[in-house]
């Protein structure tokens, strides 16, 4: 068993310093993700952003905020994995297709927003209204299509 790298003795319990390292890692990763989502929101709202970057940013924001998703978020692991995949792909496309000066400006605004915390509630409200409006229009349209049959 030693040749395979398997030890017969149990591993010692993890010390608290290792556990605090993991929690700080996850906290910093969550803050980076939040900052990048604010960057996506700011790229979406900026007037000089190309239409294709806006389209991608809008789709990413709508998918993450939308209650109806390909794999629902309440499913423990894979529900959040599809959100992460959409966010990662969208961020990569936005970084690739958006001009650098727009991204730098959005990152600077995101940094100040993360410190002040007054931009995020407005972004959440506006996104909720837009997504809710789209779903309302789609639902009413589907109702009328099915009603005519």
Image (spheres, rainbow, N blue to C red):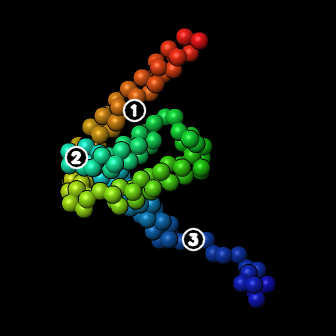
State the CA–CA distance, disc 1 to disc 3: 44 Å
Task: Give residue 124's position: percent from left, percent from top.
Answer: 33, 38
- Identify the residue at image location x=49%, y=34%: 67
Residue designated by label 3: 14
Outermost residue, front side = 149
Q: Closer to the camera, 96 or 60?
A: 96
Q: Distance between the Cα atoms at labels 2 and 1?
A: 19 Å
Furthest-bottom residue in view?
3
Up the image or down, 59 lies above or below 85; here it is above
Residue in front for this viewpoint, 104 or 51: 51
The percent coordinates of residue 147 (x first, y second) are 55, 11
First-in-chain label (2 vs 1): 2
Q: Which residue is mark 1?
A: 131
Q: Earlier in the sequence, mark 1 or mark 3?
A: 3
Quarter of the image where the C terminus is located: top right
1 vs 3, front mark: 1
Question: Pointer 2: what residue?
Answer: 46
Dot 1, how many residues are within 10 Å of its Cα: few (below 14), some (14-19), or many (20+)? Answer: some
Q: Residue furthest top?
A: 148
Which residue is pictured at 79% across the width and 84% down the height?
A: 1
Residue 139 located left or right of residue 128: right
Badge 2, how many Cα within 10 Å: few under 14, some, many 20+? few
């Amino acid at each position: 068993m030693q040749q395979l790298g398997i030890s017969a003795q149990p591993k010692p319990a993890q010390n608290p310093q290792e556990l605090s390292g993991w929690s700080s890692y996850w906290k910093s990763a969550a803050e980076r993700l939040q900052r990048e989502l604010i960057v996506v929101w700011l790229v979406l709202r900026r007037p000089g952003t190309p239409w294709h970057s806006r389209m991608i940013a809008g789709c990413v924001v709508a998918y993450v905020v939308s209650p109806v998703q390909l794999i629902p978020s309440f499913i423990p692991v894979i529900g959040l994995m599809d959100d992460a995949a959409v966010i990662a792909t969208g961020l990569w496309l936005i970084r690739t297709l958006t001009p650098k000066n727009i991204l730098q400006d959005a990152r600077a605004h995101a940094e100040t927003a993360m410190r002040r915390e007054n931009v995020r509630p407005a972004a959440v409200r506006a996104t909720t209204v837009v997504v809710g409006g789209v779903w309302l229009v789609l639902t009413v349209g589907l109702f009328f299509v099915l009603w005519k049959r």
